[in-house]
Amino acid sequence: MSRSTTRDLLIVACAVSAGVHAALVPEHLDESTAAGGGFVVATLLLGTLCLALTVRPATRVVLAAATLTFAGLLVSYALAVTSGMPMLMPEPEPIDGLALATKAVELVGLFAALALVAPLSHKRHEGATA
């Protein structure tokens, strides 16, 4: 897969995840301000990543931010459904189809971001030894 296709895949993953998180803000605000706030932050961060990835070539900082964002969302969900998250959701959240589909998209986004970071690291090492 080409770098531009992988970057496009990353942008789509950010956009889909941002849309789902945005749609779930009201529901999570009803649960608690902290939970709703977490969804607002996720939406804003993912939207910012979409914009940054679209406007300019993928830089190391943007790719690192995408990697950390997707990893954080996946780990947060794992905690949310297994033990809950103190201060945000003290009780475990039930697993549902929309969440699983969103996590699958985020996993694709994580792998796309990692694939884009890896060649940058490889090129840096090649340049140092040449």
Image (cartoon, grey):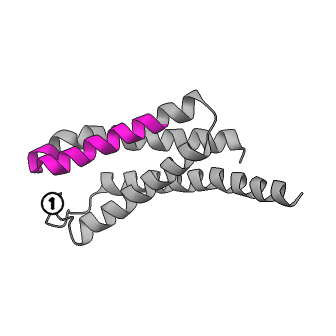
Magenta span of residues:
28-49
Residue visible at 25% across and 71% down? 82
Q: Which residue was labeled with disc 1?
A: 87
Tell me if 3 is positioned left or right of 29 in this view: right
Task: Please identify the quarter of the rendering in which residue 9 is found.
Answer: top right
Q: Would you say residue 42 sits in the magenta stretch?
A: yes
Residue visible at 72% across and 53% down? 119
Q: Would you say residue 118 sits in the magenta stretch?
A: no
Q: Which structural element holds mark 1?
A: loop
Instruction: Indicate the position of residue 125 as horizontal and vertical percent values.
Output: 77, 59
The outermost residue toward the bottom is 83
Tally of marks: 1
Name above or below for residue 34 compared with residue 26: below
Residue visible at 16% across and 60% down? 89
The dominant secondary structure in magenta is helix
Instruction: Indicate the position of residue 68 as horizontal and vertical percent values.
Output: 46, 55
Name above or below for residue 21 compared with residue 117: above
Tell me if 76 is positioned left or right of 63 in this view: left
In the image, 87 versus 128, the foreground residue is 128
Q: Residues within 10 Å of mark 1 (few under 14, many from 20)?
A: few
Residue visible at 11% across and 50% down? 32
In the image, 84 versus 97, the foreground residue is 84
Instruction: Indicate the position of residue 28 as horizontal and vertical percent values.
Output: 17, 47
Task: Please identify the quarter of the rendering in which residue 55 is found.
Answer: top right
